[in-house]
Image (tube, helix red, strand yellow):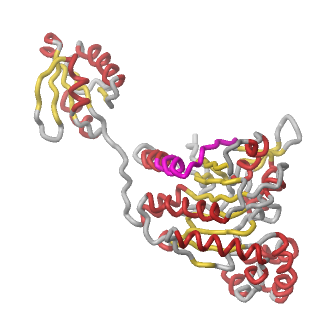
Amino acid sequence: MAKIQIPRGTQDILPGTVEKWQYIESQTRELCRRFNYQEIRTPLFEQTELFQRGVGETTDIVEKEMYSVRNPRSEDQLTLRPENTAGVVRSYVENKMYGSPNQPTKLFYIGPMFRHERPQAGRLRQFTQFGVEAIGSMDPAIDAEVIALAVRFYQWFGLKGISVELNSIGTLEDRARQRTYLTDFLNGVRDQLCADCQSRIDRNPLRVLDCKNEKCQMLTKDAPSILDYLSEQSAAHFSAVQEYLSDLDISFTVNPRLVRGLDYYTLTAFEIKMAEIGAVETLCGGGRYNGLVAELGGDDMPGIGFALSIERLLLALEKQNIQLPVESGIDCYLVIQTPAAKAVAFKLLDQLRQAGIRAEMDYLERKMKAQLKAADRLEARFTAILGESELQNGTVVLKEMATGDQRELSVAELASVLKKS
């Protein structure tokens, strides 16, 4: 029979690599603790309507990339989450988090997302995102805090050469003022644009500026900028965000073409990039989504957040030859010289583990030489040898693998010696 293989666009994270993920996740939680963001865990699948309403009908995600299935016992359509802002906002509304006295509500998540994309380096069909959401404040300082958290995240892991691109895509009213001029401009080049852009001109013309097609980018390089149509209030908000970032010595470039690919964004939009990672240079993206809470059934509360790919972080770390300080190896390997010693070793192994010591023993009935080689492969700091004489005396021979030094000590004191070593 043919072998069953992993689905395209997914990956197995094996021992030796999974430790890097565990380290990143633990450090991410520590960073969020310092910024006072609390973890939230939402379902892997939601009602399809959530993403249609929340992410937007005209987005590539909803139009092309979602994994959806009809509930076999009802007419409901369910979708594996392609992003998590909509799910977090749904939870915020459903669980009445706006009623907490601690506001704004500051949340973070780490988990898998699913999009039917063409797999390539840094872009998988199942990928892991870390994201934050701050809901309930219009203060431009919270915009700057969210951007700062993303920047500090990459700095935390030692990445160099990251850049921040910043824009304001205004309010719905700002975009309505721009729409006529932008639509007129785009209609002038409509026939030369890609099919996706042509379909967006009438539905959501600002999204045309988000197209990654080089020809479309060239044709629209002189399109009317949203920055020229911001209201006084929107312009002041954008100016304040820039001032706060400057106060934190976070450099940025204003990019008027940056609109992001999701319909819920308003005002501040940003991306963090690093050219070294190749074709997929965007590490992180985010922005404000004032109006999304109301769209999903809550009161009209402002919000801002970002999401980033852990896979792309690992790719960037690899490009810059940054080694994560992950733990490897074990503390002690019990070497069994005689069959009679196995029962003693097995009980001792459990005692060591209960004492907090990483320990292992042989389960393949190998000779002593092979067991020592196994201990070496496991990067054991010590081996504890149990032979016939040790069994009679209630002792073990403790050998330090790096130096070869060894000594005999009682079984009872093995755990305390290892903990002190």
Residue 100's place in the image compared with 364, above or below, is below
Q: As rendered, which of 97 and 282 lies closer to the eye?
A: 97
Based on the displayed image, in which of its 4 quarters is residue 220 positioned?
bottom right
Q: Position of residue 291 (x, y in %)?
A: 80, 59
Q: As rendered, which of 53 and 402 lies closer to the eye?
A: 53
Q: Position of residue 199 (x, y in %)?
A: 84, 74
Could one spot residue 280 in this view of the protein?
no
Magenta residue check for 149: no
Based on the displayed image, in which of its 4 quarters is residue 76 positioned?
top right
Could one spot residue 22 in this view of the protein?
yes
Q: Classify the position of the N terminus by image quarter.
A: top right
Q: Residue furthest front?
A: 101
Q: Classify the position of the C terminus by image quarter.
A: top left
Q: Which residue occupies 77% across, 58% down? A: 55
Q: Position of residue 216 (x, y in %)?
A: 72, 82
What residue range appears in magenta? Answer: 27-43
Q: As rendered, which of 267 and 51 lies closer to the eye?
A: 267
Q: Position of residue 65 (x, y in %)?
A: 72, 58
Q: As rendered, which of 69 and 291 lies closer to the eye?
A: 291
Q: Which residue occupies 73% across, 69% down? A: 267
Tally the marks. 0
